[in-house]
Amino acid sequence: MFIKASEAVATRGSTLILPTVSIGNVPQLGMDLLINTLQLSRIGIIDDSALLPVSGVSAFDHITSRPVPLEVYQSSDARWTLIQQRSPPLPKHHRLFAKSMLEFIKAGEFDRVVLLTSSDAALRTDALIDGPQIRSISVNCDDRILIDKLQALSLTDFGHRQGVAIGDSMNSKEPSLAGVLKQLHAAGIARPLLDMCQDAGIPALALVSLVNEGDNIADAIMVANAVNAVLGLATNVDQWRPPQSWQWIMPDSVPSELF
């Protein structure tokens, strides 16, 4: 259930950017950088029983409200709507949660969906070892400008489709969506959600970071750079500003009093 901060909140025609809870927490870290640097407003929360409950101190520099499992943020012109997810789905609830997010996408009448996810680099195929370590998966995508931009930025297609939309029946040599998604590992709800978007005819683009578990700050910066380069959220960002919550991101910075 989407609980709006006010009745004036509108999402129709906006681009939705959402992360998956996946290896290295890279999508969430990248979302932290986008929300905090762009000073986006929290326009509501999503209450979903499929997620583990969570609470804590304020995560961002410009927002005092306590974080909850799913928070919805938006730019002042409503062009960009971002979700931050703070906790993973309960065991065996991934598909149920993906279905809930699909219903939110449908109800919000978003123009398109951009999914940020990460995949275990240790399990990547040989073809994914060389080249960019952020790849793209497009579903129902006929935006030629967007596809050309992905190619110009060397965000090579994850399934080696060279920018051709998944499911294009005119190109039988291209792998199926199921075949492409099998190459994702530890990617949270990315598989079921992209599959559902294809069946529902919803335009979706996934940016997949191939990473290892550990210090993933550099990976998060790369994700923020990629999202901004593809979508053009901000043209005046010289450096991403980590939120105050990042002061405890690494074990050696956590107060010993907590243990």
Image (cartoon, helix red, strand yellow):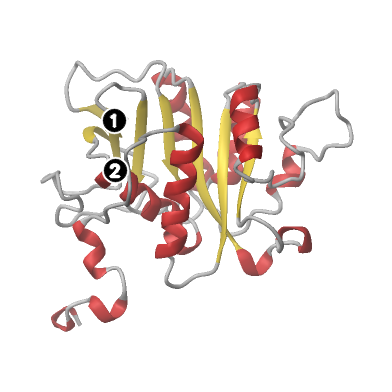
The label number, if any, that marks residue 39 in the structure image: none
Residue 28 seen in render: yes
Camera-nearest residue between 87 and 151: 151
Q: Is residue 50 above or below residue 231?
A: below
Q: Which residue is mark 1?
A: 74
Left or right: 8, with 24 as reference point: left
Q: Position of residue 80 (x, y in %)?
A: 36, 28
Query: Which class describes the residues within 10 Å of circle 1: few (<14), some (14-19), or many (20+)?
Result: many
* Quadrant in which the N terminus appears: top left
Q: Determine the image quadrant of residue 14.
A: top left
Residue pictured at 42% horizontal, 48% vertical: 224
Residue 85 seen in render: no
Q: Is residue 256 above or below residue 25?
A: below
Q: Which residue is mark 2?
A: 35
Q: Position of residue 31 (x, y in %)?
A: 36, 47
Camera-nearest residue between 126 and 151: 151
Q: Amino acid at mark 2?
A: Ile
Q: Determine the image quadrant of residue 166.
A: top right
Q: Amino acid at mark 1?
A: Gln
Figure disc tally: 2
**Local secondary structure at mark 1:** strand
